[in-house]
């Protein structure tokens, strides 16, 4: 059976999340997106844990997945580790997946003394990444730990602001318990393939959504004999049955390029280097983006593909694409009507991106059908995201080859040689 899974998102108990991110909202959103297995998020939050246990435990069929409103849920939480390493402050996020409520409760108990679990669904823990893995290992070998959005500048494994250059430095020997890495919205597998030291890790992609509407903007596709916690984890570890990931175009992510949001400065890594990585307006250090960090650490040319790599497919959130095709705002009434129409025709959003051209022409307007076809062909352009600003999709041919603040054509990793 084919399973689409989003293994990292948040409930209404995490900061800056939608109040509709409860089980009802998440299950409705999953059906619209076409996601069959959804992370609960935030299970260490005491109130959310009680709600999950009350709604899900009675439906437990001992396979590590719990059903609600026809959607399967997997117990998950993201934690934020803050610690000192070699005299510098490091901040890294990790996704923890648990096989049942007993183990989830033990995780909460094991980390409670390191942070306030009631304060945020994504708790901040004053402990190292290595300590986190040691505690998880003592609790249960069935806990699956994934370093989250590994390139994001501020809170990640390789982030420019507080990250490191390799896993051994971060985990001090406990990296043997890491089997997968989350690429994040501002990078895709092709970029990560440029680092040969990542070849032994599966690359997973998830939405990290804070509302049901953002679910499934990235996801994982599995072909499994049965849907269970262990079949999903095994597919990730072995990459057998791991069919592909759905990905943002990395330029859409809000940390792809270097820049300064307040100064409206957007630079590619090569321009940033020439400026000493300082903003040409305020002269302060730039926020160094994902593309820059990948280029710094890469030992392969872009386009090289390691053995046993899981394929991927770029998509664009359908409301964004419809709005651009129609030249409207995403909140415009016509955009909502066209979105509802195409979802009714195909059943869910992922099915739209797997549909044949003939079906698309029958289901929607020529402009939208053409835009979807261009996404499937990779024939779209972007003004890349930077310093917390999402990238902007460019469909207008006159605007192709977007330029940055320096007025020069933007570069990509195609221009980089390891």
Image (cartoon, rainbow, N blue to C red):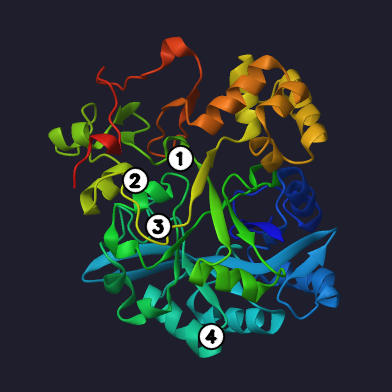
* Total residue callouts: 4
Farthest bottom residue?
138
**Mark seen at residue 290:** 2
Q: Decide if residue 149 is on the left or right side of residue 406.
A: right
Kindly identify the residue that appears in the image at 74 percent across and 53 percent down: 26
- Residue matched to label 3: 150
Please provide percent x and percent y for residue 111: 53, 79
The Cα atoms of the two marked residues, 1 and 4, are separated by: 33 Å
Residue 283 can be seen in this image? no
Q: Decide if residue 180 is on the left or right side of residue 343.
A: left
Mark 4 or 2 closer to N-term? 4
Kindly identify the residue that appears in the image at 81 percent across and 54 percent down: 24
**Mark seen at residue 33:** none
Quarter of the figure that contains the N terminus = bottom right
The Cα atoms of the two marked residues, 2 and 3, are separated by: 9 Å
Q: Tell me whether circle 4 and circle 3 mark residues in contact (CB < 8 Å).
A: no
Please provide percent x and percent y for residue 277: 19, 39
Crowding at dot 4, Cα within 10 Å, few <14 / some 14-19 / many 20+, comes out as few
Q: Secondary structure at mark 4?
A: loop
Question: Which of the 4 image quadrants contains residue 364?
Answer: top right
Q: Secondary structure at mark 2?
A: helix
The Cα atoms of the two marked residues, 2 and 1, are separated by: 9 Å
- Residue matched to label 4: 141
The Cα atoms of the two marked residues, 1 and 3, are separated by: 13 Å
**Mark seen at residue 253:** 1
Q: Tell me whether circle 2 and circle 3 mark residues in contact (CB < 8 Å).
A: no
Mark 2 or 1 closer to N-term? 1
Mark 1 or 4 closer to N-term? 4
């Amino acid at each position: 059976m084919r399973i689409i899974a989003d293994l990292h998102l948040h409930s209404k108990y995490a900061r800056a999340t939608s109040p509709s991110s409860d089980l009802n909202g998440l299950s409705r959103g999953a059906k619209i997106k076409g996601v069959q297995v959804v992370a609960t998020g935030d299970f260490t939050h005491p109130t959310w844990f009680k709600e999950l246990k009350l709604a899900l435990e009675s439906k437990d069929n001992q396979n590590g997945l719990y059903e609600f409103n026809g959607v399967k849920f997997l117990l998950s939480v993201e934690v934020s580790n803050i610690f000192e390493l070699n005299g510098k402050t490091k901040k890294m996020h990790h996704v923890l997946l648990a096989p049942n409520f007993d183990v989830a409760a033990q995780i909460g108990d094991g980390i409670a003394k390191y942070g306030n679990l009631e304060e945020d669904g994504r708790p901040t823990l004053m402990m190292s990444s290595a300590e986190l893995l040691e505690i998880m290992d003592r609790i249960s070998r069935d806990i699956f730990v994934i370093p989250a959005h590994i390139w994001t500048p501020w809170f990640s494994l390789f982030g420019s602001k507080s990250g490191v250059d390799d896993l051994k430095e971060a985990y001090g020997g406990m990296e043997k318990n890491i089997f997968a890495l989350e690429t994040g919205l501002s990078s895709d597998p092709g970029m990560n393939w440029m680092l040969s030291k990542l070849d032994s890790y599966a690359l997973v992609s998830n939405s990290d959504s804070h509302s049901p509407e953002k679910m499934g903007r990235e996801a994982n596709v599995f072909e499994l004999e049965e849907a269970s916690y262990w079949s999903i984890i095994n597919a990730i570890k072995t990459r057998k049955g791991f069919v592909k990931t759905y990905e943002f175009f990395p330029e859409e992510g809000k940390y792809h390029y270097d820049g300064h949001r307040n100064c409206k400065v957007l630079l590619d890594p090569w321009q940033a280097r020439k400026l000493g990585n300082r903003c040409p307006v305020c002269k302060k250090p730039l926020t160094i983006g994902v593309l820059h960090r990948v280029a710094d650490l890469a030992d392969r040319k872009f386009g090289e593909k390691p053995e046993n790599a899981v394929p991927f497919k770029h998509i664009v959130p359908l409301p964004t694409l419809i709005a651009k095709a129609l030249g409207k705002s995403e909140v415009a009434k016509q955009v909502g009507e066209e979105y509802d129409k195409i979802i009714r025709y195909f059943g869910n959003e992922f099915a739209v991106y797997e549909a044949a051209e003939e079906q698309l022409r029958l289901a929607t307007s020529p402009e939208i059908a053409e835009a979807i076809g261009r996404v499937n062909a990779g024939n779209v352009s972007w003004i890349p995201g930077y310093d917390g600003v999402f990238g902007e999709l460019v469909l207008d041919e006159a605007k192709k080859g977007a330029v940055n603040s320096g007025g020069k054509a933007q570069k990509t990793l195609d221009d980089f040689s390891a």
